[in-house]
Amino acid sequence: MVRPYNTPKRYLCLNLDGCGQILPDWLMVFCEIARQVRVQKIGPGGELELRSPIWSSAGVETLDRRKKILAHLEAKVPPQMLRFSRRKGRSPIAVIGVNFEDCLSGGQTLSGGDHVQLSQD
């Protein structure tokens, strides 16, 4: 299924079904979070509840795999971009950081001038 969205600088169209065979699960979840942030127009400090439609569209079905992906994203993505809040018995929440929009629009620098480096693991 093709899920397009517009950005100020370019038009991005990501076929999540096709990407599922070549991208790791954690990157698929990150792309789906980015898509939801754009569609719902969530700004810095906003929250996105990671319910089952987000996981399903990224191809992640089991609870155990979801926990591993969240742990991986917490370790690899700087908290200035994205952080997660977990509560027992509730869906995890992604809190959008101040630099998340810069990452999506191509400017990947933190406020201190350091470059954001997403690990390739």
Image: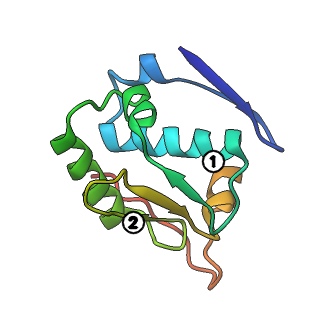
Q: Amino acid at mark 2?
A: Ser
- Figure coloring: rainbow
The answer to which quarter of the image holds residue 24 is: top left
Residue sitting farthest toward the front? 89
Residue 85, label in figure = 2
Q: Is label 2 in a helix, a strand or a loop? A: strand
Q: Residue shown at 77%/41% (left/top)? A: 7
The relative height of residue 83 versus residue 32 in the rendered view (above or below) is: below
Residue 117: give x, y in percent of width and height: 46, 64
- In the picture, the disc for residue 82 is none
Please rate how many residues cluster around mark 2, counting C-alpha atoms within 10 Å: few if below 14, some from 14 to 19, many from 20: few
**Location of mark 1 (residue):** 37
Q: Is residue 58 left or right of residue 41?
A: left
Residue 40 placement, left or right of 9: left
Is label 1 in contact with label 2 (beta carbons under 8 Å)?
A: no
Residue 112: percent from left, percent from top: 62, 85
Q: Residues within 10 Å of mark 1 (few under 14, many from 20)?
A: many
92 up-or-down from 54: above or below: below
Amino acid on which the number 1 mark rests in the picture: Val
Q: Is residue 44 above or below residue 51?
A: below
Q: Secondary structure at mark 1?
A: helix
